[in-house]
Amino acid sequence: MTHSFRAAAILVSGLAVAACGSGSAATNNAAADAASSAQASAAAAAKLAAAREAAVRKAAAAKAAEPRVTLTRVETSDGSLVTVAIFRGTVRYVLHDGSEDPYARPGLLKDRYFVGSAERTQLLAAFNGGFKMAAAAGGYEQEGHVLYPLRDGMASLVIDRSGHARIVVWPGPAGGGDAYSVRQNLQPLVLDGRPTAAAYQWGLWGATLGGGEDVARSAVGEDAAGDLIYVGSMATTPYDLARVLAREGARIGMELDINPAWVQLDAARHPGGELRAEVYGQNRPANQYLSGWTRDFFTVLG
């Protein structure tokens, strides 16, 4: 009898252990399933977050690439009112000769003294070039044709075949090998992010109307991102322009044309839009480059 009781107890104990083992296995399987589900959910969430982040980056890049011009006006400490235009995004630059200066024989150049109809639909802005060639302030090359010899050491706005522009002290690091169009004008006004010593000596920067220091002047610089910055005023000094360029981030800059008849910036809110005259008090209307002009100028296309 005692033996039978012990056998029954052992049997019950075995069944209990087996039941306990089965319960533990089920619990472990459930936990494993839950962990796997959590991992899958986390992976899906991470994938969705990455996709959203990529979409945000793509949208930001597209926004940054949009051709645009940022316009501001700066009043300097001596009272000059300087217009600042920064060209950003995917823009292209084109150099146009003037109907009188610099002179090119008919048929030699594609982009002439006016903005063509195809170019007009892409036009974001246009601004004046440099001194007359007779001033011997530098050379001139357009579309691979050197109309006036380029000179070493001169500040130069260089445009390659793709329309990308940069400013260098000629011939620059690339040796001028990729130049398609080049407009030179005097020595640098800004170098290494600071006004040059020559910027303080206004007499070095061209003959002014009436012989004064504060006259209409313009300049262009390039910042660290490779964007061009145009500055212009109807009454300012070379140093004022240099200081404004440096303040706006220009690492290098050069003076462009001076005196009231020649300083001009026209810009639109978007490529192909209506142009507005942007240098406060400028003499020429916003459509001057559309109808044609006697002197060279640049267009900014988007």
Image (tube, rainbow, N blue to C red):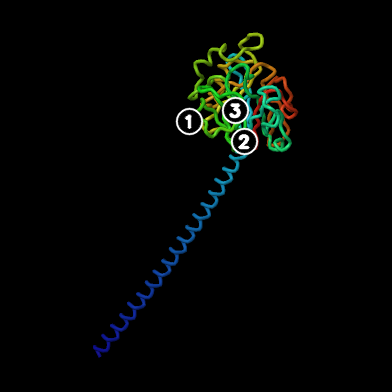
Q: Name the residue tied to disc 3.
A: 146
Q: Residues within 10 Å of mark 3 (few under 14, many from 20)?
A: some
State the residue in front, 280 or 229. 229
> In the image, residue 134 lies at what x, y percent?
63, 17
Quadrant in the picture for the N terminus: bottom left
- State the SS at label 3: strand
Task: Return the disc, 1 or 3, that comes first in the chain's sequence.
Answer: 3
* 133 is higher (above) or lower (below) than 211: below
Q: How many marks?
A: 3
Q: Are marks 1 and 3 in contact (CB under 8 Å)?
A: no
The amino acid type of the residue labelled 1 equals: Pro
- State the SS at label 1: loop
> In the image, residue 103 lies at what x, y percent?
67, 24
Q: Are marks 1 and 2 in contact (CB under 8 Å)?
A: no
Q: For the residues carrying marks 1 and 2, which lies nearer the camera in this image? A: 1
Q: Which of the numbered marks, if any, corresponds to residue 270? A: none
> In the image, residue 100 lies at what x, y percent?
70, 22
Q: Which of the numbered marks, if any, corresponds to residue 92? A: 2
Query: Visible in this render: residue 294?
Result: yes
Q: Which quadrant of the figure has residue 179?
A: top right
- State the SS at label 2: strand
The amino acid type of the residue labelled 2 equals: Arg
Compute the Cα span from label 3 to label 2. 21 Å
Q: Which quadrant of the figure has residue 118?
A: top right
Query: Visible in this render: residue 81?
Result: no
- Point 53% across, 14% down: residue: 200
Q: For the residues carrying marks 3 and 2, which lies nearer the camera in this image? A: 3
State the residue in front, 202 or 76. 202
Q: Residues within 10 Å of mark 1 (few under 14, many from 20)?
A: few
The amino acid type of the residue labelled 3 equals: Val
Compute the Cα span from label 1 to label 3. 20 Å
Q: Which of the numbered marks, if any, corresponds to residue 173? A: 1
